[in-house]
Amino acid sequence: MDKNFDLIVIGAGPGGYVCAIRAAQLGLKTACVELRKTLGGTCLNVGCIPSKSLLNSSEAYHKAQKEFSNLGIEANDIKLNLSKMMNNKNKSVLTLTKGIEFLFKKNKIIHLKGIGSVSSKNTVTVTDNSGKKNSYKAKNIVISTGSIPTSLPGIKIDEKIIVSSTGALAFEKIPKKLIVIGGGYIGLELSSVWKRLGSDVIVVEFLDHIIPGMDKDISSEFLKILSKQGINFKLNSKVTSVSVVKDKAVVDFTNNKSAKRERIECDKVLVAVGRKSNISEDISKLGVKLDNQKKIQVNKKFETSIKNIYAIGDVIDRGPMLAHKAEDEGIAVAEIIVGQAGHVNYDVIPAVIYTSPEVATIGKTEEQLKKENIKYKVGKFPFLANSRAKVNNETEGFVKVIVDEKTDKVLGASMISTVAGTMIAELAIAMEFGASAEDIARTCHAHPTHSEAVKEAAMAVDKRPIHF
Ligand SMILES: Cc1cc2nc3c(=O)[nH]c(=O)nc-3n(C[C@H](O)[C@H](O)[C@H](O)COP(=O)(O)OP(=O)(O)OC[C@H]3O[C@@H](n4cnc5c(N)ncnc54)[C@H](O)[C@@H]3O)c2cc1C
């Protein structure tokens, strides 16, 4: 095999594999190194895809048990087969990871199997399973080694009793009691899965609200909804220790305000306190600059401090740790390498929580605008007044649109709805095109759809919603 490439990408997650495909489309001789057996990174193997499979299956189980009879569907004797549910999840993951193998072949991308390290500015060394090293030359290198779960000081994840999201996606038995440390989106999605499947779930969160950084209206409404679903929350609580005693865990935490201490015994603890960038030793040795959170510093062109070495995705110092952000960066960097004007608009990156109902946000929150001293107006519309949501018995949640007070330009939006993750795309397009609330309000939306609530929220900015 010719060992000279125009581009070698290290890591085949959504950042890396998408970058490799776009680079190959643009005519670059491209290789992609991946240490996992399967392609697709965190997202396909232990992230977005398996979590969404379990969210979907557990929601179907919950509905069959609790909601079908209201619709006149009498399905008696509903039983859960967890291993079949897990097999279905594994099958989806396999199909999608194989799909990327196919796309690599189709685009003539060389898949290098093993651990990639940057041994010099133009050399990538790949160490395979047996320890054998091979070196390859590259005009350009893209680092897309992603991220890994973090823990709290003194808490050791064993993936048996104290687990990360990876362990919580593969429990063999339904834990009777599950404690989730961290009320961010990964913790809450997995709390929903196991609650629906029968666990008693307690979420312990350090802050006084869930989903840090999200619009406060959304965060407090979401907390009410999840509490109504039976998830217990211990807010304002600092976990001080987690210990394993036989096959149980004991979690100690202290209330930040009252200093009251609590101890709860449980079957499993999910540590969902965030992820950190995955930086290998070679990167630091080579002198690639990192920020104070140990993320790779890049400029607008995704160049690191070493020319011809680029970085994208969860490993870099900008944007949220999300798969679609990594994908867009993958496309942009490939285009930049061939001299095109690749670009990512960090002001318009949607974020979705795939619980039921879903939560979706984009752009600025009210809290951010206040801090930035930007005058704004808000339009809100509840799903209680949306006909499609009503007939589907999905009336929880609302749409909130935030616009510039003077220009009416949309600055941000957030929503809670069963289909929020799909609906947020309309706001993304609107914001990319610099639309005003009036533009959305005067766009014809199909009836009856949940999307009509977006139109009505846009009309509510000007205090003229029709159905509320
Ligand atoms: C439970 C969970 C649910 C999630 N759900 C969502 C969701 O619904 N939507 C969303 O947008 N995001 C979601 N995410 C986040 C998403 O998975 C990440 O943002 C995304 O995968 C980042 O892509 P990446 O390409 O930067 O890195 P990764 O996907 O982490 O890929 C990096 C790859 O590099 C490989 N690698 C690392 N070092 C080397 C090396 N030296 N040599 C060779 N290979 C190497 C790794 O094995 C890995 O395959 C979720 C994450 C988790 C954990």
Image (cartoon, helix red, strand yellow):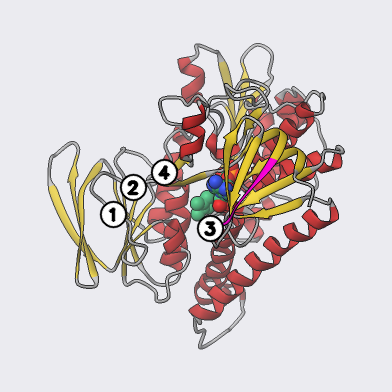
Magenta stretch? 131-136
Q: Give how far apart the Cα atoms at labels 1 and 4 are.
A: 15 Å
User: Callout 2, which amino acid?
Assistant: Ser
Which label's residue is closer to the chain start, 2 or 4? 2
Which label's residue is closer to the chain start, 1 or 3? 3
Q: Badge 3 is on which residue?
A: 131
Q: How many marks?
A: 4
Q: Give how far apart the Cα atoms at labels 2 and 1 are.
A: 7 Å
Q: Give how far apart the Cα atoms at labels 2 and 3 are.
A: 30 Å
Q: Which mark is residue 151?
A: 2
Q: Give how far apart the Cα atoms at labels 3 and 4 are.
A: 32 Å
Would you say the residues marked 2 and 1 are in contact, meaning their CB atoms lie under 8 Å apart? yes
Q: Badge 1 is on which residue?
A: 156
- Percent position (x, y) of residue 69? 56, 77
Which quadrant of the structure image shows residue 26?
top right
Q: Badge 4 is on which residue?
A: 274
